[in-house]
Image (cartoon, rainbow, N blue to C red):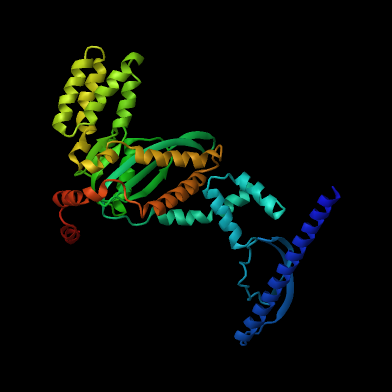
Amino acid sequence: MSTSIGQNNFENQLEDMVRSFVQEKLETVMKEEMNQFFEENPELKNYKNGSYGRQLDTKYGRIEDLQVPRDRDNAFQTEMFQPYQRYEQWLGETIVTMYHKGMSTREIGNFLEHILGHAYAPGTISNITDVVMEDIRAWQERLLQKRYAVLYLDGTYLKLRRDDVANEVVYVVIGVTEDGYREILGFYVGGQESSLGWEEILSDIYRRGCEEVLLGIFDGLPGLEEAMKAVYPKADVQRCVIHKVRNTLNKVRKKDRSAISEDMKAIYQSNSNEEAEKQLEVFCDTWQKKYTKIAKSWREDFNVLTTFLNYPSSIRPMIYTTNIIERIMKEFKKRLKTMNSLPSEEAVEKVIYMVSDECNTEWSTRRLHGFKEASPELHTMFEEWYGSQTETEEKS
């Protein structure tokens, strides 16, 4: 026990010595800065006016009474920190990084208390992460590429606090270039998912430069196809096949699920529209009598479920489903889960932005499977639908 106490005393004394050394060096540098300030500004009728004490959190702990030199006219400002800064830049960057990784403000506060020896309130940490809001606004207004072969659209609900806590939607759009590089183009927080909301979002994507699209991929929200066509009238639309399959299986008896699943698979694993149509007839002939509504639904949705068959075979596994964007939605929820009920729309935006920025950086050098082979054909489709890049630029 005595050894442990002695070790603790030694560590405490060492920490105090390091902090004293850091304080001494900081104060020496600031005095030199003050001297240089007067040498460079001899025309100022100004004088040194002692110093004042302040706190500063450093990576070596808190300095309680750092002596900052001042002048009579308050014209001097040290380069070491800003006038009202209470922590070094490293601390702010650390807090933002921890927030980025999904830690709650309370968890970050507890961590900082452990390493610095004093507490940071969750509100203070939230204020520090507010620097991210400027980046978010710039990111949301950034210019996009003119052409995206594919747009994935999806929305997910999460709890958001305004006057009370309620579920609100986060809309997300992912674009894929004709060369196969993904990018989260935008996210939009608030309200309930609707076709009108999607039309406004797609209009914003268009406004920011994304003017030419080949294919929009999404789930079965009513009106979303019309919203896509309103903004991108030349684009194809693809309903997520996996969503359709799941919804179908939820409506049939357990003993029939395996057989129906195989018959549906025969439709969407066809090599051509003609083959898919034949498999649709087999499906309907087999199940029409027992599941009339299901057979009718597959007939009605057939065209929007098989659009992907008009595209190069190498990318079909990527474009018949919304799996690519659903994985990102799960990551958003995972990062946000630690925050319990969210304090504000801004808190949601901070986390989603930082995850989006991280994903875009990672994806910028990773091409989606199959797009390298499909790129020439996709480029030809763009030229046929929208004209060459030169022609469209001249018209604009």
Q: Is residue 261 above or below residue 184?
A: above
The image shows residue 8 at horizontal and vertical percentages of: 79, 54
The image shows residue 318 at horizontal and vertical percentages of: 29, 40
Return the residue found at the far front. 3
Q: In the image shown, does 158 or 371 lie closer to the viewer?
A: 371
Q: Is residue 223 left or right of residue 356?
A: left
Residue visible at 77% across and 62% down?
A: 14
Q: Quadrant of residue 51?
A: bottom right
Tell me if I can see residue 293 in this picture: yes
Return the residue found at the far top. 289
Q: Quadrant of residue 189?
A: top left
Indicate the quadrant containing the C terminus: top left, top right, bottom left or bottom right. bottom left
Residue visible at 73% across and 69% down?
A: 21
Q: Is residue 294 left or right of residue 77?
A: left
The image shows residue 139 at horizontal and vertical percentages of: 41, 55
Tell me if I can see residue 119 in this picture: no
Residue visible at 18% across and 25% down?
A: 279
Residue visible at 81% across and 50% down?
A: 4
The image shows residue 325 at horizontal and vertical percentages of: 36, 41
Q: In the image shown, does 374 or 380 lie closer to the viewer?
A: 374
Q: Is residue 286 above or below residue 66?
A: above
Label count reads 0
Q: Is residue 360 above or below residue 230?
A: below
Q: Is residue 366 above or below residue 342?
A: below
Return the residue found at the far right. 2
